[in-house]
Amino acid sequence: MVFAPGRINLIGEHTDYNDGFAFPAAINKGIALAISKNNSDKSKVYALNKEELYEFSLDTIKPLENGGWRNYVLGVVSEIKKRGLNIGNFNSVFAGNIPGGAGMSSSAALENSFVYGLNELFALGLSKNEMILISQKAEHNYAGVKCGIMDQYASMFGVKRSALLLDCRTIASQPFRIDLKKYTLMLINTNVKHDLSESAYNERRSVCEKVSRKLYVKALRDASIENLEAIKNEISSGDYQKALYIIQENKRVQLFSEIIQEGDVNALGKLLYQSHEGLSTKYKVSCEELDFLIAQAKQNPNIAGARMMGGGFGGCTINLVLKSEYKKFRKDISTKFKKEYGKACAIYKVKLSQGTHLIK
């Protein structure tokens, strides 16, 4: 049995596919997988929460149209086979408590649970670094999302009570023990997932790559604001704003890692608000419901900072809330959101936990 956690990201959104920096952490919500060998000619996967069984042959794997969770599993198996590694048929069942579409990377947790489980079951000898690259490729080639490495990395390498300053170019990280003093983290899920998300995600990535080529750099991580200013007239204002956001966000992540050691929660909060402003007005991946939650947080003196988290167009905001005011804010924001949108938001408290591991 394997547990693979979801993740939150304190700051550094959409920077991973720009070879930049991010500040993710594994959380105590995730996916549990039980897996064993079988002697039949088919592999079987049962999604317990959905009560769906899927059987497939290892010899004829290809992406399914509208395959949902099945494509993540098939993608992992396919990428393992592409490496020339032999696996036999297996039976498996998985269940999770990560809310889908909340920006906590349920897909990365699912991929990691399977690659980790198959690696153990068939003694494939894969390193954790190799495993997360398999998970990432599964997402690219089977789910059609050209994601960076952050989600898979945080889910695999998470450290208890810590967040990771992740360099997405070297795929190496430094853990920072997180002590928010009188504050705690609150996730508020809008419970909306706009259909734009996957196509818009890939479109943002192609804009970043286009501007990088124009600047003759490998990725926007290598660009400065001055470099960008020099080509401002050669690109559209929209592309300029998106590239500017990425350059600024990378700086914010590095600043965040310095401030966290000083323990200045209000300064951290200001960086979160700046990050959201950039995601909303420059990178344009927010939505009305997310912006509403941030506006409400800004009006409340008991919130040090907040921002949208994840790919965007729905999902969660992450909030730094005074512990003593947690219950009051939860009730207040729930009431206001329901009044504004006629439906409930969902609120979660999460702990920072260890990465993917065998359940003893």
Image (spheres, rainbow, N blue to C red):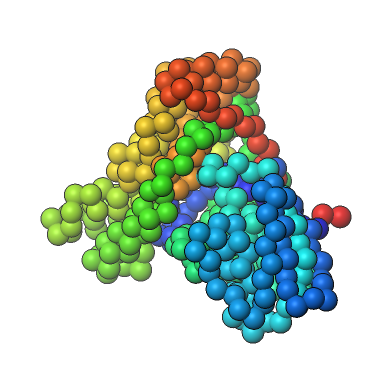
Where's residue 358, x and y in %? 79, 58
Task: State which quadrant residue 179 falls in.
Answer: top right
Asked whether, in this view, residue 234 is left or right of residue 202, the answer is left
Q: Residue at x 49, y 39 (%)?
A: 315
Q: Quadrant of residue 352?
A: top right
Taking 96 as reference, is 202 left or right?
left
| Foreground pick, 11 / 293 | 293
User: Of 187 and 40, which appears nearest the observer?
Assistant: 40
- The answer to whether residue 252 is seen in the rendering is no
The residue positioned farthest toward the right in the image shown:
360
Residue at the (57%, 50%) spot, across then down:
105
Residue 112 coordinates in the image, percent (x, y): 65, 60
Name the foreground residue: 183 vs 57.
Answer: 57
Which quarter of the image is occupied by the C terminus?
Answer: bottom right
Q: Is residue 35 visible?
A: yes
Q: How many marks?
A: 0
Identify the image quadrant of the N terminus. Answer: bottom right
Residue at 34 percent across and 55 percent down: it is: 204
Residue name at image x 61 percent, y 78 percent: 60
**Quadrant in which residue 45 is drawn:** bottom right
**Residue 311 in picture, x, y percent from top left:** 45, 48
Above or below, 274 against 173 in this view is above
- Seen in the picture, residue 40 relative to 223 is either above or below; the reply is below
Among all residues in the image, which is located at the extreme left?
Answer: 233
Residue sitting nearer the eye, 49 or 100: 49
Looking at the picture, how far across and down is residue 286, in whole percent?
38, 39
